[in-house]
């Protein structure tokens, strides 16, 4: 079992968390979003090997937060509350 650091509740079991996607992958806005823009938002991912910034939700408290972790060895470097502009 791995512990993930919720910035609101502290370290918790990984089973309490849900992956929300790449940090900075902002949903296209407006009514004139093309099919290719929408497809890119849904399907294109950086999928880096190494350092990654992601959005996670702690299902127990319901809060979204940013987690920076290494995708190779799954070590968590930091976690922090999201700013309103990235929700």
Image (tube, rainbow, N blue to C red):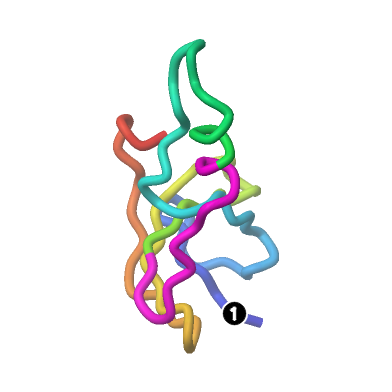
Considering the image in quadrants, where does the C terminus appear? Answer: top left
Q: Is residue 58 left or right of residue 9?
A: right
Q: Is residue 36 above or below residue 43?
A: above
Residue drawn at point x = 57 percent, y = 66 percent: 12
Return the x and y of residue 5 as percentages of the image width and height. Answer: 45, 66
Magenta extent: 40-52
Residue 48: name its quadrant. Answer: bottom left
- Label 1, secondary structure: give it: loop
To which residue does mark 1 refer?
2
Between 25 and 86, the residue placed more toward the observer is 25
Q: Is residue 31 above or below residue 66?
A: above
Between 84 and 23, the residue placed more toward the observer is 23
Is residue 79 rendered magenta in the image? Answer: no
Q: Is residue 14 left or right of residue 84?
A: right
Residue 82: name its quadrant. Answer: top left
Residue drawn at point x = 62 percent, y = 69 percent: 14
Mark 1 packing: few (<14 Cα in 10 Å), some, or many (20+)? few
Please identify the residue farthest to the top as the structure is shown.
Answer: 31
Between 50 and 64, the residue placed more toward the observer is 50
Total numbered labels placed on residues in the image: 1
Between 66 and 29, the residue placed more toward the observer is 29
């Amino acid at each position: 079992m791995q512990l993930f650091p919720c910035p609101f509740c502290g370290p918790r079991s990984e089973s309490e968390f849900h992956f929300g996607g790449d940090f900075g992958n902002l949903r296209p806005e407006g009514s004139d979003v093309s099919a290719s823009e929408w497809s890119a938002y849904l399907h294109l991912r950086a999928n880096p090997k190494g350092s990654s910034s992601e959005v996670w939700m702690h299902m127990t408290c319901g809060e979204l937060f940013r987690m920076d972790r290494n995708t190779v060895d799954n070590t968590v470097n930091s976690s922090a509350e999201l700013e309103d502009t990235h929700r």
